[in-house]
Image: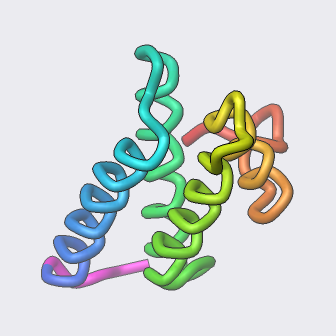
Amino acid sequence: MVMNDEMENKIRIMTFEFSEELKKIIRPKDQSDRTTFRRIAEYLEKGIKEKRYTPMIFGIVLQWATEAAGPQSRNPAAVFMKILKEELGYGKSKNKRI
């Protein structure tokens, strides 16, 4: 799919802003968490470019992150990943590479 440069740049900015907000909601504990969050952002960005998602997906996923980071959550990152797998099928394919 061909996308103009202006749209490409807007999506990159949105992806960056999403990443920064996600790190505020669920603080990464280590490099593995940071890598996982980066890959989630890349997955969503790719999904938008391929028209599987609209840019609204960023807000939706941030809502899920907020839910996962609730006061009762002992491991927000794990809860968040579970939600992503259930809602988006994220990471379910063994051969899926981002």
Q: Quadrant of residue 93?
A: top right
Rendering coords of residue 73 (x, y %): 71, 39
Residue drawn at (50%, 18%) of the image: 32
Would you say the magenta stretch is mainly helix, strand or loop? loop
Q: Is residue 1 left or right of residue 21?
A: right
Give the extent of the magenta segment.
1-5
**Is 8 rendered above or below residue 28?**
below
Q: Nearest the camera: 45 or 56?
A: 56
Q: Nearest the camera: 86 or 10?
A: 86
Q: Quadrant of residue 79?
A: top right
Residue drawn at (64%, 37%) of the image: 76
Rendering coords of residue 36 (x, y %): 52, 32
Q: What quarter of the picture does the C terminus occupy?
A: top right
Q: Quadrant of residue 10?
A: bottom left
Q: Nearest the camera: 21 or 73?
A: 73
**Is 77 rendered above or below residue 64?**
above
Q: Nearest the camera: 85 or 7?
A: 85
Taking the magenta stretch, the answer to whether it contains residue 4 is: yes
Taking the magenta stretch, the answer to whether it contains residue 25 is: no
Rendering coords of residue 66 (x, y %): 56, 58
Rendering coords of residue 87 (x, y %): 79, 64
**Is 86 rendered above or below residue 58?**
above
Residue drawn at (85%, 57%) of the image: 86
